[in-house]
Each structure stands twice: as structure tokens, then as C-alpha cells.
Image (cartoon, coloured by chain):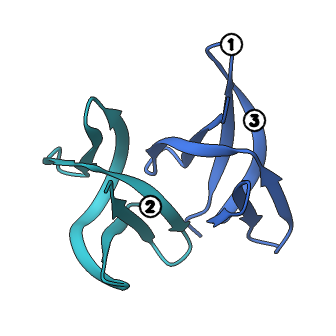
Chain colours: A cyan, B blue
Amino acid sequence: MCEANAYILKNGKEELLLEKVDRVLPHEKGLLLQDIFGRQMLLEGRIKELALVDHKIVLEEIT
Amino acid sequence: MCEANAYILKNGKEELLLEKVDRVLPHEKGLLLQDIFGRQMLLEGRIKELALVDHKIVLEEIT
């Protein structure tokens, strides 16, 4: 499976937010993240960077 | 390998832009896409949606 872990940038550091993310969809207030088990999380943020071979999604909050 | 194909949304349709994308990085004017062979492409756009289990990145142009 080619899911990735989602990290949020806080004060220049990447903190793990959600593991095994499959889908990231635009949502009214930001993003809807969904993991491979169907669990969902809303984030007022946007995608900053992807490194898929490293299974990594970097997100940042909307300020 | 867990690369994905990048599609660009044009008139509501997804057109294949770059295959086997590993990294997507923020760039001065939008995004820098890099495939698993190191080939790079610049796009004045942003990431709209991810579907990683389907190996899919959907981008949209900045209008």
C-alpha cells in the first residue's frame, strides 16, 4: 500500500499528525484527511510538500 | 516504489501531467515536481487533492 504519514509544520518542526493517509481532499475550511481505514480528520491547513517515496506529506496550518 | 502520477485539472477534467512523481515542493511561483528519475517540472499551481492508494496527485493551476 502506498499510503503516507501526514506531518504538520509547527515552529519549523514536523509533527506527526496522522498515519497511513490515503486521501487528502479540499474541504470548506481547509483539508479533509482520510486514512486507509476510512478514519477522517479535518485540518485548517494546506499541503506544503510531498515526498512520496519517503511516504511523507507535509502540511501547514492556514494562518 | 510509492510514486504517483500527477494530473492537472483543466475544464473539470484531469489531464496527465507527469508520471512517477516522488516529490512536490513549494517554489517561488508555484510548485516544483520531481519524478523518481530526478526529472523536474515547474508548475504555476497548487495541490488540490491526493489519492495515494490510487497513486494520484491532482493539481490545479493558480488563476
The residue sitting at 56% across, 74% down in the picture is A53
Same chain for mark 3 and mark 2? The answer is: no
Q: Position of residue B8 (x, y in %)?
A: 69, 33
Q: Which residue is mark 1?
A: B11
Q: Secondary structure at mark 1?
A: loop
Q: Mark 1 or mark 3: which comes first in sequence?
A: 1
Disc 3: host chain = B
Residue beneath disc 3 = B16
- Do marks 1 and 3 share a chain? yes
B1 in relation to B57, above or below: below
Say which amino acid is labelled 1.
Asn
Image spot of residue B58 (x, y percent): 57, 38
Q: CA distance from mark 3 to mark 2?
A: 19 Å
Q: Check residue A2 in the rendering and tell me which mark sits there, or answer none.
A: 2
Of all chains, the one bearing label 2 is A
SS class of the residue under badge 3? strand
Disc 1 to disc 2, C-alpha distance:
29 Å
Cα separation, mark 1 vs mark 3, equals: 14 Å
The one of B27 and A24 positioned closer to us in this rendering: B27
**Chain letter for the residue marked with disc 1 in the picture:** B
- Image coordinates for residue B28, horizontal then vertical, percent: 72, 62
